[in-house]
Image (tube, helix red, strand yellow):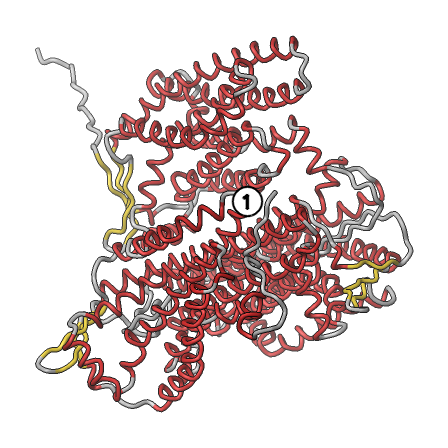
Amino acid sequence: MASNTTTTPTVSIPLTVTASMETVTADTTAQIFTIVQLIYGIPSAGLLIFFFFFLFGKKYSNSFYRLVQFDLLVNFLTYINSWFAVRIDRHPIAIPALKALTYAFPGFLTWTRYFAYFFMHMQFLSAIVLSFHRISSVFLHSQYNKLWNWGLIPFCILCIIYCSACNLLIPGFITEVYIYNGTLTKKMFFSVIGVALNLTGIFSAIYFILLVFVGLATSHLVTRKIQAASFSNGGIGKKLTKIAGTYGIIYSGILIWSCVSALNANFKFLPTIVSQISSNLLPFASDMMTLALPYILFIHDTNVKQDLWRRKTESRIISRINSTIIEISQAKMENYTVYMENVTIDSTTEIMAIVQLAYGIPSISLMIFAFFLISFGKRYKNSSFYRLVQFDLLTNILVYLNTWIAIRIEMHPNFVFIVKFVESRLPGLMTWLKYFPYWFFHMHFWTAELLTFHRMTSILFPYNYENFWNRYYPVIFIVICVVSHLPKYIWTGFLYEVYIVNGQLISINFPKTLDTAINVVALFSTIYFVLNIINGVLTIGLASRKIEAATTSKSNIKKKLTLISITYSLVYTAEVVWSVLNSANSYLHFLPPWFTKLNNSLLVFASDMFTLSLPYIMLAFDTNVKKDVCICCKKRPVSNQGTIVFVSQIIMSLNVTPDNIFSMEAVKIDSAVQTLATIQLSYGFPSFGLMIIFLFLIGCSKIYSNSFYRLVQLDLLTNILLYFNTWLGIRIEMHPACIPALKFIEKTLPGVLTWSKYFTWWFMHIQFLTAAVLSVHRISSIFFPLKYEKFWSQYYFIFGLVFFIYSFLPTLLWFGFGNEVSIINGILSKKRNSETIVKATNVTAIFSIVYFIVILTLGLTTSILVSSKFKAVSSSYENVAKKLTRIALTYCFVYTGILMWSVITAMNSNLNFLPLFIVAINQNLLVFSSDLMTLSLPYIMLIFDTNVRKHVFRRKTPVNSNNFGFTSFLISS
């Protein structure tokens, strides 16, 4: 009798699975969850950054706040890492960006997945240490603050070591992400994933028990001690304990969820529906803990609440307009005069400005990039839609720049001189610039609405709309500019009038006119909101029906353009809603008082969100833009020759060719190159001589005994060697008359020319360091006024040695010579190693951007800190603060200009929009921009350093030692 028993075949799970990440399909549920996460995540991440800097204030000197800052930093990094590790790879539109990132930083995405487990442990430590701090405040009341301040850095190091040790229990990477045959590929190790999940479950259970135990102990001990204490800071103890306790409870809840999920993976006791959406619920639960601390500080910390919501005792008008946003608190209606040079600033405004610059500078650069990309790119010539996008981008660029010149920089005492300079050179311009925010309010609406109108006409008039828009768009633009100005005639005169009277920069404010203008804007905000909603709904309805009937290729194009216009319209609608609510609140007062007080700053961010959003919307939805950007990321052209600093050799319009050897003696005379070389020599020789004179002048004279001058000497020496190297390594080989000299050098000292070309990359790093250390010196003089002089005088040589060694390290990333010069068969020849040059180019591009951001941040930080210190010491130092600011701005301007030129050159390598004669001499133009930085320090010293001026020009007035006009004042607190 045959047996009816059948054996179930065993299903083996493969140990590894390799799959393409580019085949991911859009998931509506995931997209909705992502949008929700971004809605609360972006402002919350912004708050994390804001509070990290905000807690450097004097009120927050308690060591508890240092631990809070540590936790804020950990949470910010955790949140950013979570997007790269697990979230954005679910969305097809993000894959090109991830691919470009992997090209630039191989292994980056692999490590982000690994760090997801690292940050789990780090978050626990940064959370539980807050409770330990409160316990230590009970048992070591007189010593705990000093103990924690001293032990903060060792604690942070121990945390990193502990988290790394925990990760070593995981036998390798969970996933590996790399480029394979041009495809972004992910390799998953299921055995490693299983171990990682089990370890996570175990650690979650342990951490949960510890957190609950420590939390209860903290609550019990601190409550009992505070009740028995008579000291005055019992309220502070309660406040800090509430913060630690609340945070511990929230984190405990997240760990419970992690434990339950880990148990369910083995025992399957949760309902199926919960298991299905668990992967989406866990990010929300994780975000609740990661992003919670700023809100806890809002609720429980009275210092934070007072600083952010403090009331102004004097009644005044607050009017801040950024393209569309107005919020007014009005108490008097008489005209009055404001002396703009007497402006004061608080730390909140300073931090806000730094945050605005942090996202504003890259965003405005992206807008300029997108404007030129669309202007000259072949993909965009045939579509009238992109003409409207150009108009909107140009409007937004002008809006953003105008808000800084007309509104924002005047809030900062260090930058009022810019406003004064503009008004002195072009009287009346500042009055108009202060009016333009109202004009741009209307321009913004029309430029955004044109995109929606364009999509509607493409549906209603599919055969004629392209011809209409291409023919009449200049007329439409002019009409919009005129129409946007018409509402001004509803009120009389200007809102503000700026003059220079008796050398003082003043602003005459007209509150009645301002009140009328605000009412007009409120009315138009409502009208524009209604129109925007109607047009958006109509466009969506018409587009959804028409696109279904279109061919596949046309359907994709129309979907793309419609998505751009509708998304942009929604962003604008959100901003206008905010404006309408604020207008209504000025009459009805329905918003909470704390929100109203913060509202002025929030309005600026809301305005920026709309003004700067279009490039990101295009990157998300426009395949043409994504393709062009990916091309820029993947195909960086390489030049034959390096030049100094900041990507001079990064982006030349030459294609990468195989390794080849060619004769340097075959170079021909080029009249344009000779002319440029003559110009370079005409300013280069005197500037080079001036640098050498200053190097010895500062070294030999007792007047320059301040340690700051030692760093200036280091910078001068670097620039002298750098400038000499550019001629030896790059410039003179372009001239046939100089080739025999190069050949003689190579015969006498073989390899010198090869190393000279290598040093053009090396000098980029050391030049940045010698420039940045000047600002670091000034910052140290503020934080350590009694020690910094001795420190820098003793260790400046060591810093120079460290800079020397560090500058070699980035070059190890490509390891080798890009160009090798040698004599072959009696001919001076150069071998070009293309692969090495490509790697060097990519590394240099990345470091250039990093250095630009760092030097800008250091410049702003130095300006703010030094100016506030001078004000605290004596009013006589106000002029010094101005000079400091000018120095910082000069350095930032030079770096910004060079970086901008590099970006334009990179774009030209793909779009070819620069004239051929500029392309032909582009490398020489890059040399000019390089020289601007290299040779600038002597002239900056002549302008701003009173000691140098007195010494050089031999004035009769006595020269005071250590009285460095722009930075080297000894300040004692």
* Residue 869 as seen in the image, left or right of residue 896: right
Q: Position of residue 532 (x, y in %)?
A: 68, 55
For the question of whether residue 621 can be seen, the reply is no
Looking at numbered disc 1 in the image, what kind of residue is underneath it?
Answer: Pro
Q: Position of residue 580 (x, y in %)?
A: 75, 49
Q: Which residue in the protein does label 1 denote?
A: 785
Q: How would you rate the neighbour count of disc 1 (Cα within 10 Å): few for under 14, some for 14-19, many for 20 or more? A: some
Of residue 369 and residue 300, the one placed in the foreground of this image is 300
Of residue 886 and residue 115, the one placed in the foreground of this image is 886
Say if 791 sits above or below 593 in the image. below
Q: Which residue corresponds to the image point at 74% horizontal and 54% vertical from the top-left? A: 343
For the question of whether residue 189 can be seen, the reply is yes
Q: Position of residue 549 (x, y in %)?
A: 50, 59
Q: Which residue corresponds to the image point at 39% horizontal and 46% vertical from the top-left? A: 25
Say if 343 sits above or below 940 in the image. above
Number of numbered discs overlaid on the protein picture: 1
Q: Quadrant of residue 203?
A: top left
Of residue 820 and residue 964, the one placed in the foreground of this image is 964
Q: Which residue corresponds to the image point at 48% horizontal and 56% vertical from the top-left? A: 708
Of residue 331 and residue 188, the one placed in the foreground of this image is 331
* Residue 257 as seen in the image, left or right of residue 589: left
Q: Quadrant of the N terminus?
A: top left
SS for dot 1:
loop
Q: Position of residue 803 (x, y in %)?
A: 35, 54
Q: Quadrant of the C terminus?
A: top right
Furthest residue toward right: 334
